[in-house]
Amino acid sequence: MRIDLHCHSTASDGTDTPAELVRHASAAGLDVVALTDHDTTRGHAEAVAALPAGLTLVTGAELSCRLDGVSMHMLAYLFDPEEPALLAERELVRDDRVPRAQGMVARLNELGVPVTWEQVARIAGDGSVGRPHVASALVELGVVPTVGDAFTEEWLADGGRAYVAKHETDPFEAIRLVKGAGGVTVFAHPGADKRGRTVPESAIAELAAAGLDGIEVDHLDHDADTRARLRGLAADLGLLVTGSSDYHGSRKTVALGEYTTDPEVYGEITRRATGAFPVPGAGGI
């Protein structure tokens, strides 16, 4: 089985619609794909409706969190999307995205970059607006060559010249909320230090003690040494180890299925989940 547990669509900051995503996942030879848009489940229904035969969809979201001033992302799988407490927190985070993006546009203008809110809104479309949309605007304007090059201290990285903070959930609260909604939690790309500061291993140990289920180890932003270190940490803490592409369509160079999760780990995730179940493809529309 080929299993990719971290992908994005136009419901947040990917470039594939949810329907395109599942079709591309099937064409890439995946058996299981997770749709984990940022702080939203809005793309799930479209993905389910278009799900090809032979492909299973894991519903989820990537939750924006912050611990001691450090931004981090929490993958949440197979939770009940209508559970009130988690739904309210996701809406609180999502509602803060627009004023935050508008604030980044204003800071870029102050730095002499002629980006406009209309440009960013056009790029975001119906998606949950975020930094990648602002970064794409910088690429359009020729300010940076790629989206990744916008995530530096010069521009949009945490603490960067055009960075604006948004509401982010305490990760211990995120674990509690996801567990309350019957879901499973995996710390996304915990060693991705090219994106900015990362939380220390001592904090990961505290999160594990609070109920964290796993950490994403095999990821584009982790080199071989980081993966080995994180795999050892997971073993010490009794955490599941996942691998995922973090696919964003054409917004990133990584391909669907470039990094995958072991079938036994996937099985354990589905066994722990009580809020929702994987959806087998029935042929799509």
Image (cartoon, rainbow, N blue to C red):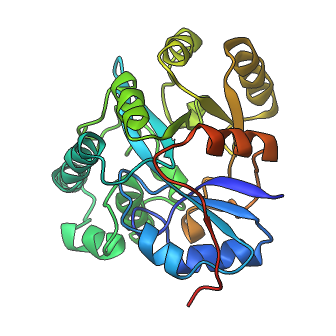
Position of 232 relative to 71 (above/below): above
Q: Residue at x 42, y 69 (%)?
A: 43
Residue 29 appears in view: yes
Up-down: is 47 above or below 168?
A: below
Relative to 94, does residue 161 appear above or below in the rendering? Answer: above
The residue at the point 75 percent across, 60 percent down is 257
214 left or right of 224 in image: left
**Side of 72 relative to 68 (left or right):** right
Specify the quadrant of the image occupied by residue 267.
Answer: top right
- Image coordinates of residue 100 in percent, x first then y, are 21, 48
The residue furthest bottom is 285
Q: Quadrant of the C terminus?
A: bottom right
- Is 132 or 230 nearer to us in this picture? 230
Residue 45: give x, y in percent of width and height. Answer: 43, 73
Please name the residue shown 67% across and 24% down the image: 239
What residue is rendered at 40% in x and 62% in y? 12
Residue 119 on image: x %, y %? 27, 73
Between residue 1 and residue 232, name the one nearer to us. Answer: 1
The front one of 78 and 28 is 78
Task: Between residue 149 and residue 171, name the one nearer to us.
Answer: 171
